[in-house]
Amino acid sequence: FAVVPDCCDYFNAGVMVLSPRKSIFQDMERKIPLLPSYDKGDQGFLNEYYKNNWHHLPYAYNAQQPDYISNPVQWNLGTCIPCPCNLLYSLTTLETIKVLHYEHKKPWVGKDQELWPIHKFWWFYHDQLQSINDL
């Protein structure tokens, strides 16, 4: 099980690498009512279920939109951003991100000027696929 770390020893479940087994899934189902979930959802449950038993993926595999909103200059420079728990995330540049996680404002809802530097990637691939479909 591999994910990108979040703050304070948690991980973000937006992008995960799984090797599922039926026995693990059944164990998860049994533990849903027993394990606490800090967000009352799947991410909190998965953090508790896999506590201290997950592999770290580089930030580039789940770069998160709110990090860009609060630190656009650092993203452009490829420097680090602070975490509330005094951790630092080493950021890649916009050009080297592998997976961009649009957690909040979705690019397909509208072209937001503030977020255009990261929404433009979605629109680029959208337009390419659209032109292929038009053939």
Image: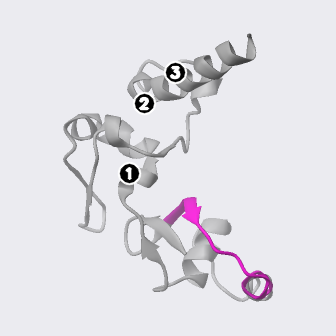
Amino acid, disc 1: Ala
Q: Quadrant of the N terminus?
A: bottom right
User: Which residue shows up at 28% across the image and 46% down it?
Assistant: 92
Res 40 visible: no
Q: Disc 3 on helix, strand or loop?
A: helix
Q: Which badge, 1 or 3, comes first in the chain's sequence?
A: 1
Q: CA distance from mark 1 to mark 2?
A: 13 Å
Q: In this figure, which residue is indicated by the disc labeled 1?
A: 60
Which disc, if any, is residue 124? 3
Q: CA distance from mark 1 to mark 3?
A: 19 Å
The image shows residue 60, relative to residue 35, as above or below, that is above
Q: In this figure, which residue is indicated by the disc labeled 2?
A: 118
Question: Is disc 1 in contact with disc 3, using a CB cutoff of under 8 Å?
Answer: no
Amino acid, disc 3: Phe
Q: Which residues are magenta?
A: 12-26
User: Which residue shows up at 19% across the image and 37% down it?
Assistant: 77
